[in-house]
Amino acid sequence: MGCCKSTQYGCCIAIDHDESIILNKPTGKEIRYGPGWFCFPSWWDAQVIKSIALQSNQYIIVKHIIDPNNISTSHTRNDIPLTKRTTTNEKDELLNDSEMQLIEIVRGPQIYQLKNPYDIFSEIKSMLNLSSTQYIIVTDKLTGVKRVECGPQLFCPKPYDEIGEIKNLYNLSSTEYLLVTDQSTGERITVTGPKLFLPKAYDQISPIYNYVVLNHTQYCRIIDSRTGVMRIEKGPKTFALGPYEALLRSDDQTIFDIINIDTENAVLVKNLDTGLDELITTPQKFIPSFTQKFMEIRKLVKLAPYENMVLIDKDGQHILKNGVKDKSFFIYPYQQVYKQNWSNDLKKDHRSTVQVDRFDTRNQYMDYEFLVRTADNVEIILDVSIFWQITDLYKLVLVTQDPPEDI
């Protein structure tokens, strides 16, 4: 900027080609551009403004203000050429702004000179450099509408844009998925990998989940919370849950082992429709249905020819199992094994016992010790060896709980 020379009637200022001067006259403001000398009365205010050099990644925000004291003439005289305007409203000159303000985004590369003496401009701002894996959510403050801007790009906002934080796209591998809920409609979808996922403006994103992995001996149960429909998936398989699906949990487990039913293993289940217990003995790879609740695995009971067992059914009746006729069998629902506690110490006083559920019909040997006194009051401890045998198991069960003690 050149020097200012004062005279008797005013002042003269020299300005360069990249400068302009705003003269504040009694009738309003006026702008003039350099280079040259400009003379004006001393009672006028003058302000020299340097042109703004904008690089390709820079922009400024300019607020155009029409002279509030003379709106019609000012608007006609100082018409605002917005050749580089980027706006959310094509008719923003007609906006209902009480201060008659219009906002313009001026992008580089260019040398920007002020066009209206009433304009207000911001400091130089940098555009957002979005890579190919980044995005931002932008909200239009005039309409409230949101949109997504994704890279790669050098993003320059529009006049009324409010910019959110820079976020990374969701990188999903081939074994990952996530749930997306559209907050504008409430709809939910499942997005599966492999994918580089870009959300929409109103999407709410869940954490990234791993696929459900089932090997060839596993299965799981799935329920759809929207329809209530349940299904069973069995391995080998990997899959993603649907938007409204969840794994059914039982005993703190969601993945269960398929049960092998063979000649020596059966499965006891409860029928949830009838409430009755069922024993499944047919050899198979067994997966309980939705109306069946797994109770336990029951082993095949094997008896030697000299062994016997007693079962009690739901009516309290005794069922005798003989090792000659019933060499092997399963214990069916509502049956239980009858057990006795036999004394196994020398005195046979039931202080020390052993539990017996298989009754041996062979000859058995038993030691017994007891104290006797002679005629002259001398104590003698006698050891006796007894040989005995069960000949009628049903009578034994009816009359005694501890045969060694009774013998």
Image (cartoon, rainbow, N blue to C red):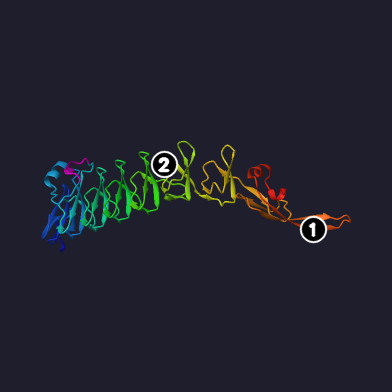
Which residue is at the far right?
A: 376
Which secondary structure type mostly characterizes the magenta part of the structure? loop
* Among numbered discs 2 and 1, the one appearing first in the sequence: 2
Q: Is residue 385 left or right of residue 239?
A: right
Q: Is residue 314 left or right of residue 278?
A: right
Q: CA distance from mark 2 to mark 1?
A: 67 Å
Q: Position of residue 110 (x, y in %)?
A: 15, 58
Looking at this view, is 363 or 262 the one in front?
A: 363
Which residue is at the far left?
A: 36
- The reply to whether residue 45 is visible in this rendering is no
**72 magenta-colored:** no
Which residue is at the far bottom?
A: 2
- The reply to whether residue 341 is visible in this rendering is yes
Looking at this view, is 268 or 401 the one in front?
A: 401
In the rendered image, which quarter is residue 18 located in? Answer: bottom left
**Element under label 1?**
strand
Looking at this view, is 79 or 219 the one in front?
A: 219
User: Alpha-carbon neighbours of circle 2 within 10 Å: few (<14), some, or many (≥20)?
Assistant: few
User: Alpha-carbon neighbours of circle 1 within 10 Å: few (<14), some, or many (≥20)?
Assistant: few
**Element under label 2?**
loop
Looking at the picture, which amino acid does disc 1 mark?
A: Ile
Q: Position of residue 136 (x, y in %)?
A: 27, 52
Of circles 2 and 1, the one toward us is 1
- Give residue 290's mark: 2
- Give residue 381's mark: 1
Looking at this view, is 286 or 386 the one in front?
A: 386
Which residue is at a point 66% across and 50% down the rendered structure image? 389
Q: Position of residue 144 (x, y in %)?
A: 27, 43
Residue span colored magenta:
88-96
Looking at the picture, which amino acid does disc 2 mark?
A: Phe
Q: Is residue 42 left or right of residue 290?
A: left
Q: Which quadrant would the N terminus be assigned to in this image?
A: bottom left
